[in-house]
Amino acid sequence: MSGADLRPRYAIATLGSAGDLHPFLAVARALHEQGEDVCLLSAEPHRDEVAAQGVPFMPILDAAAHQRTLQHPGLWHPIRGFGVLWRHMAVPAIDPTVAALRQLCTDSPRPLRVLASPLTVGARLARELLPLHLSTGHLAPMGLRSCEDPMFMGAWPVPRWLPRPMRQGLWALLDRSKLEPMAAPRLNAWRLAHGLPVLREPVFARWLHAPDQVLGLFPDTFGPMATDWPVPVYCTGFPLYESHATPPALDAALAAFCAPSPQAPPLLVAFPGSASGGRHAALAEAAQHLAQSGAARVLWLGQAADDAANAPALSPRVCKRRWVSLAQVLPWAQAFAHHGGIGSCAQGLAAGVPQVLLPSAYDQFDNGARLRWMHAGLGLAPREQRGPALVAALRQALAAPRGAPPPDVTPSRPGAPNAAVQAVCAALSGG
C-alpha cells in the first residue's frame, strides 16, 4: 500500500448526555477538519448535533433506550445511579458497538484508531476481537481509581486520616459487593460466546482501561493528580466544545439583563442541569430568595426553565431561558451554581467565575472537591444543598473575587480547536 493508504482512520465512541458527547465531538470535528476519515458512534438522539458539525455518525444505542436511561428515577442516586447507566445504556450498546467497529475494520485495510469513553464498554471488548488501537478517554479524574485524596464512596468523602490499607479495603468491598456482581457475569457470558476467556482482573479497577492508551480529558491542574492510578494517564486538558465559530448574539432582553451596571446587584447564573427535581426546587427557592432580597440578579437556565414548580418566579431580577451558551453569559456572572458535571466545571473555570456545585452522583462530588482545592468553587454536601445553608453558599460565591481563567482552559470552536483537542488528536495519531 502507498503512504496515503496507511493513514489511520478514526472512530470516536461515547454514550450519555450531551455533556458526555461534547468533548468527544470536539475531537471528532477537529479530525474531520484536518481531512481525516473519522466517524462518531453514539446514541441515536445525538445524530443531528453530530451531523451539524459535518462528522459522519453511526448509532450504537436506539432513542428509546437512551431516553429510558435519562428518565430513570434512580439515575441520580449516588450509589444506584451507575447501575442504571450500566444496565440500560452500557450493556445494550455492546453488540451495536462491536458490530459498528467490525464494519469499520472490514470496510478498509487502513488501520483503525478508536477513542472511547469508559461507558462504551463494547469498544473495550472489540479491542480483544478486532485489529484496532484503542484509547480510553476519561472526562474526569473520578473514573480512575485511586486511594489518594480526594476519595469518595458515592456522596461520602473518605476521611483524610483513613490509612491506605483501609482505603484499599473500601474499593475491594465495593467491587465484591456491587460492581463485580453487576458487571462480570454479563461480560464473561459475552466473552465466552465470542471465544474469549473470562476476565481474571476486576472490571473497573483495571480491565476497563484500554491496554493501548489512556487519556485524561482534563488538565493536570484540575486538583491533585493521583500517583497511584492503575494505568499511565496522559492529561490533555478540557476539550471544551462550542458549536459555533462565532457565538450567536444574545437576544436584546437577555443582553440587557446580564449587562453589568453599578445600580444592579451581581449576576448569578443558575444551571441545575439534569440533576434531580429536588435539587432543582431547592436551588430555585434559594435563587428566588436572593432575587427578592436584592442580593442578586438570577439567570435561570436549562430544561426546567419553563417549569413553574422547579424554577424561580419571573421578576425584574429573574430571567429564564431554556438554554444559551454558558461561554456567552458566564463572563458577566459573579457566581455560577450548577449540578457539578465536568463540562459545567470547565466552563466556569474558563470564565473565572466562582462556582457552587450541588452534586448528586458520579464524578460530581469529586469535581467539587477539586474546585475547592483550586479555590475556584464550593462543592456542597447533600445536607448543604437546601435552605439557609445553600443561600449562605451562594452569598459567599457572590461576594468572592473572580479568578483569572487558567490559560489551559479555553473553548474549542469550529476551525479553531483548543490546545486540549489538538493534544488528543496528536495522541490518537501516535504523534
Image (spheres, rainbow, N blue to C red):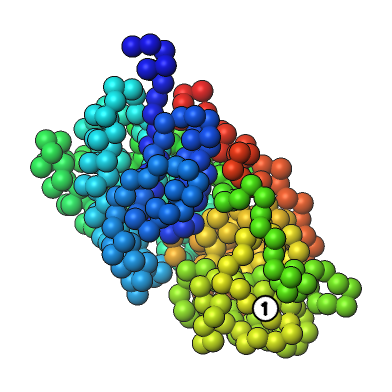
Q: Tell which of 250 and 153 is nearer to you.
A: 250
Give left or right: position of 200 versus 325: left
The residue identified by callout 1 is: 319
Give neighbour class at mark 1: few <14, some 14-19, many 20+ (Cα, 10 Å).
many
Which residue is at 43% across, 59% downward?
A: 17
Q: Is residue 355 above or below residue 212?
A: below
Number of numbered discs visible in the structure rendering: 1
Residue type (three-letter) at the residue carrying disc 1: Cys
Q: Quadrant of residue 9?
A: top left
The picture places residue 219, in percent across and down from the top left corner, at 59, 43
Give left or right: position of 57 versus 273: left
The picture places residue 53, in percent across and down from the top left corner, at 50, 46
Q: Quadrant of residue 415?
A: top right
Q: Quadrant of the N terminus?
A: top left
Q: Is residue 427 above or below residue 84?
A: above
The picture places residue 79, in percent across and down from the top left corner, at 36, 66
Q: Tell which of 227 and 80 is nearer to you.
A: 80
